[in-house]
Amino acid sequence: MEFEHVTFDLPHGTFHALQGGDPDGQPTVVLHGFPDHPPTAKPFLAELARQGRHVIAPWLRGYAPSPTAGPFDFASLTGDVLALIDRWSPGRAVELVGHDWGALITYDAVVTAPERIERAVTLAVPHPVTFLSRPRLAQLRRIWYMGLFQLPGSGWMASARDLAFIDRLWRQWSPGLSLDPALQAELHEHLRASMPAPLKYYRAMLRPSMIGATRRLSQPIEVPLLQLYGADDGCFLPPKVDDRHRFAAPHAMEVVPDVGHFLHIEAPEAIAERIAAWAK
């Protein structure tokens, strides 16, 4: 399955994306997370496209070659995605699939503009208000890197020794995954061109704008939503609290065995099939 590199002139600048699949199929937007970008998920994108979808996967704000200038608050990040949806699929609601930070943006998008999203899938990350309301000690130990990213010079630390720190996170978060060397080299190239912008997502979480985002995210989600987690995720644990009250539309949660944080990269066919089965 071939994907073409396309660009969109949006209010914040020129955004780049991979696009492929059936132009008449279900429009599907796939959002990557940290520390990642669209090319590493090409097999997953291809599986979605083979199921009859028209797929687009943008480089998010802060990730070259898309604009690397901030701000990086939720409203800005979500605004980019909604602007892309308006340009790419103006007459039809989209299926929105988000991983990691892409999942957080997905949670925000479905409460900000539910009419533009037919259904949504989040990968690896729980509802942010659920996560913030009852953080477990075991979970807090896994996200130590968020505190590190608040420090001056953390961008240099993340980039040092050919992004050894980033490679360490990938190994910890998905212990069973060995990223293809060519894909890893391409990811390194783009992350070097992006730093320290991807780390600023985490710094924005401590800004006053997060209060408004939390209030917005506290609204019940009125878009059908599927949450998928990897059983071997070294970054995020599936929530143990009952948060069904946050979903006012059809909702399902599944823990996928034998995969970690980057579950869609580890098992692209299996994850795409789970999404397809749920979407029916």
Image (cartoon, rainbow, N blue to C red):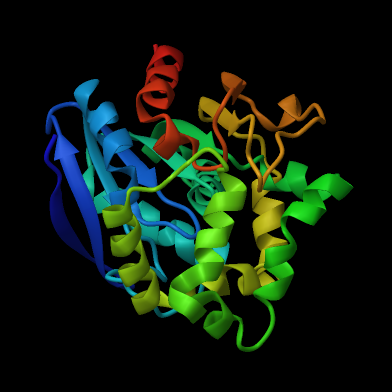
Quadrant in which the N terminus appears: top left
Can residue 49 be seen in the rendering of this structure?
A: yes
Point out residue 44 in the picture as x, y percentages from the top left corner. 32, 34
Residue at horizontal 32%, vertical 69%? Answer: 190
Q: Toward the viewer: 279 or 271?
A: 271
Residue at horizontal 51%, vertical 30%? Answer: 223
Residue at horizontal 61%, vertical 81%? Answer: 154
**Which residue sits furthest bottom?**
152
Left or right: residue 84 compared with residue 196: left
Point out residue 239 in the picture as x, y percentages from the top left corner. 75, 34
Q: Is residue 8 above or below residue 178?
A: below
Point out residue 129 in the picture as x, y percentages from the top left corner. 73, 46
Residue at horizontal 13%, vertical 28%? Answer: 24
**How many numbered badges does the structure rendering display?**
0
Q: Is residue 257 above or below residue 159?
A: above
Q: Is residue 115 above or below residue 48?
A: below
Point out residue 218 in the picture as x, y percentages from the top left corner. 71, 45
Quadrant in which the C terminus appears: top left
Q: Is residue 220 above or below residue 64?
A: above
Left or right: residue 32 compared with residue 39: right
Left or right: residue 149 compared with residue 182: right
Can residue 196 be seen in the rendering of this structure?
A: no
